[in-house]
Image (cartoon, rainbow, N blue to C red):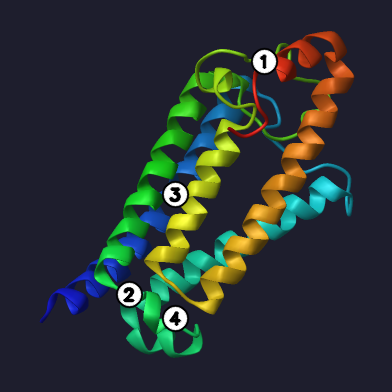
Amino acid sequence: MDSSDLASLITRYYLAFFFSAVALFYTMRVLKLKRRTSRDIIFPGDRFCRTWWNHFFFRVFRVIIWLICVSRAVYFSVDEHLIVFEFLYQPILLISGCIMLTIGFVITVRIHCNYGDQWRSGIDPNGPDKIITHGWYGISRNPMFLSIGLAQTGFFFALPSAFSLICLCFGLWTLFRQAHAEEKHLKRIFPNEYYIYATHVPRWL
């Protein structure tokens, strides 16, 4: 087995493990917070509104990605249907993609920890109580979306294909839409504070 085959095999199994771990983390995170706070944690918005569609597509793609990655670990022939970009299917890119994927997730988890019990998925119509301006949020107004975007980019390089490219484009588009919606919500609740915050901290980097 040469280095290319080894990198491909490692990446194949790592992606199945990684996305299973991510699914487990978010499931446990939501259940734990809901039990501890006795409040709703996920707020997709009114049915068929912009943020509802963001949540819907994000969930659909997340499930599809998990199913594909787990299937690839068992049935290698799955790759034949993903339209793999052979010119990008190089050991250094595959491993780099896994590293980016991992770093993005680790940063996301760290930001989750900074939120504590205040973390919510989507826009809570009754929150937040305050704007977080320190730590990661002193560098970017959307650090969690940046880390998720990094992970999505990593997934493309770990599995360079038409499938992962579609996931990347759709994922980044959804993140931009959600960031805009959340910023609009914060401006409405904290008009003066958010204006001052936005003048000192960039939306992205």
Q: Which residue is mark 4?
A: 85
Quadrant of the rendering where the C terminus is positioned: top right
Distance in Å between CA atoms under marks 2 and 4: 19 Å
Q: Secondary structure at mark 3?
A: helix
Q: Mark 1 touching mark 3, by CB under 8 A?
A: no
Give the mark nearer the N terminus: 1 vs 2: 2
- Mark 2 or 4, closer to the camera: 4
Return the residue at label 1. 200
Mark 3 and mark 2: Cα distance apart in space: 17 Å
Q: Secondary structure at mark 2?
A: helix
Going from N to C along the chain, the mark reached first, 3 or 4, is: 3
Quarter location, residue 193? top right
**Which numbered disc flags the more N-terminal residue, 1 or 3?**
3
Residue 53 drawn at (x, y percent): 80, 55
What residue is shown at x 71% (from left), y 59% (from top)? Answer: 57
| Circles 1, 4 touching at the beta carbon (< 8 Å) | no
